[in-house]
Image (tube, coloured by chain):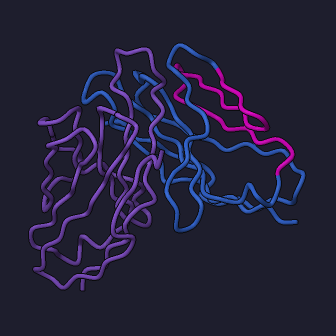
Chain colours: A blue, B purple
Amino acid sequence: KQEVTQIPAALSVPEGENLVLNCSFTDSAIYNLQWFRQDPGKGLTSLLLIQSSQREQTSGRLNASLDKSSGRSTLYIAASQPGDSATYLCAVREYGGSQGNLIFGKGTKLSVKP
Amino acid sequence: NAGVTQTPKFQVLKTGQSMTLQCAQDMNHEYMSWYRQDPGMGLRLIHYSVGAGITDQGEVPNGYNVSRSTTEDFPLRLLSAAPSQTSVYFCATKRVPGLVFPETQYFGPGTRLLVL
C-alpha cells in the first residue's frame, strides 16, 4: 500500500530564507505528484503538479522536483515571505485504480517570521 | 465561475442524526470526490465518481453514501452520524484523464462537521 511521508512536520524560518520541504513515497509506480497549500480553515490550493515523466516544475518562487526511482519529491521555496506561512501537502496519484484518487502526506506546517 | 462550492460551512449534529453535505462545481469536470481530513491522519478518500451515474468507494466509505445524478453535483450523505465522523470534509474535482487537460485537482473550501 502506498504511503506518503512529509518531513519535517513543522518548520519555522525567518523571512527571506530559502527552504526545502520533503515528500517521500513508498511505491515508485506513480502517475503524478501534486503539491498543495492549505491555509488555516481553508481548502487546498494546487501549487505544482509533476507528471511521472517529468523531473521538475516551476512556478514563480516555487520549484518542485521529482525522483521516482528514489521515491522522493522536494518543494523549494525561494526568498520566503510571511505570506508563505501555511501547511504544504504532497499527494501522489497512482497508475490504474480510479483515475484520480490521491494519497496524501500529513503535511508540513510552515511559519515564516518577519 | 464559482469553481467548487460546498455547503454548509459548519454543522453540528447529534449522534444518530442524518444530513447531506453538498458539493457543486461549474467547471464541467467529470471526476468528483470526497475526502475527510482529521488531525494526524491527513486526507483520506471517502467516495468518488467518474461521471454521472457512476460512483465507487474510496479508502474510508463506511457510514457514507453518495450519488451522482448530474455532472455538477455530488452530495455526501451521512445516514446515522457518529462521533467518529467528526471531521473536515472536502470535495475535489478534476478532468478525467485520457483527455488533453492538466490533472490538477480543485478543492472546495470544506465543511466542518461536529457530531456530539
Residue B12 position in % (x across, y down): 29, 82
Residue B7 found in image quarter? bottom left
Q: In this view, does A108 lie above or below B94?
A: below
Side of B17 where B51 appears, left or right: right
- Quadrant of residue B98 within the rendered picture: top left
The region drawn magenta spans A56-80
- Front residue (pair A109, B103): B103
Q: Considering the image in quadrants, where does the N terminus of chain A appear?
A: top left
Q: Which residue is drawn at 63% across and 41% down?
A: A22
Tell whether A24 sits left or right of B38: right
Instruction: Tell me, yes or no, whether the highlighted magenta stretch contains residue A76.
Output: yes
Give the x, y percent position of residue A70: 55, 24
Q: Please tell me whether residue B60 is drawn above or below residue B81 in the rendered image.
A: above
Magenta-colored stretch includes residue B2: no
Along the line of sight, the residue nearer the viewer: B12 or A88: B12
Q: Where is residue B23 in the image (x, y as percent from the top left)?
A: 31, 54
- Residue found at x 43% / y 67%: B39
Left/right placement of residue B30 relative to residue A106 reads: left
Magenta residues, dominant SS class: strand
Name the quadrant containing residue B72.
Answer: top left
